[in-house]
Amino acid sequence: MALDVAQIHSADGLWQSLAALVGSDGTRTHLHANALVAASPQARDLADAAHLVCSLHGRHPGVIDHAAQHRGVEAATGWLGAAAAAFAEERARIVALAVAAGPLPSTPGQAESEATVTAQRHALDMLSSSARNGCSLGASLALVLDWPALNAVLSAAGKRFGQDMPMPEFPSETDVETLVSTLAGSPGIERAVMFGAQQLLAQHRGLFDLLQARAEARDRV
């Protein structure tokens, strides 16, 4: 369940609100994401995850690239540049993993799945290109904070398909905390950051909802 942004925001500040949001709504809380990291997930489920993550985040420009080009929050320029450089390397690994995983697993309802992924890509593009100052930054911050949980899934797939998937050298959580502390006192930007973060995490949850539904559909065949 999404957090009450206004309530946690006023109580604990932007960094605490952002961290709490990722902790409650991030990938690490999704049952299917955890199942893919568990002892013996099926190879086809891991291949499916590799392909769908690649569909969302294996493209250029991506979420962070759009935000870096937008330059809406000047204080974030350096942080976004460092994050974009780190994700450029990660993007290449994601694409290589999808290739190593082989063809997309045959799944009932493929046309509907493709439509869902296309809608998610469009949503991410709109979010990360938003003219609302702070929105694309919030999406980028949430992506960096949520990526360790996504990387765990990619690493599990990498082990199965012979690809090394180290964690990208993103700016640290301390760097994120330092950055968001500079936004204090700008309520409009703070609200936009939280909105962007919420929407990015919603797309990640939607991704794993889709992966779970596809896995269940394959199991029924």
Image: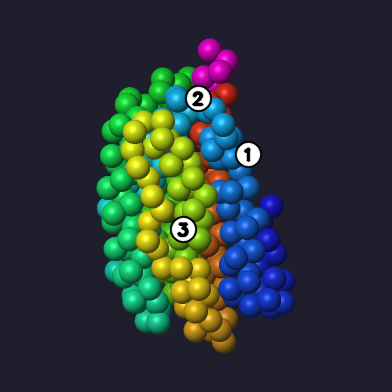
Q: Position of residue 205 (x, y in %)?
A: 56, 46
Q: At 38% across and 73% down in the image, what residue appears?
A: 79
Residue under circle 1?
Answer: 31
The residues colored magenta run 217-221
Query: Mark 3 packing: few (<14 Cα in 10 Å), some, or many (20+)?
Result: many
Vertical order, 121 against 71 (above or below)? above
Q: Nearer the viewer, residue 38 or 125?
A: 38
Would you say 87 lies left or right of 190 here? left
Identity, as a three-letter code, of the amino acid under mark 3: Leu
> Of discs 2 and 1, which sits in the foreground?
2
Question: Secondary structure under badge 1?
Answer: helix
Vertical order, 157 against 124 (above or below)? above
Q: Which picture quadrant has residue 168?
A: bottom left
Q: At 28% across and 39% down in the image, what residue appears?
A: 96
Q: Position of residue 54 (x, y in %)?
A: 36, 42
Dot label at residue 143: 3
Q: Position of residue 15 (x, y in %)?
A: 58, 73
Residue under circle 2?
Answer: 42
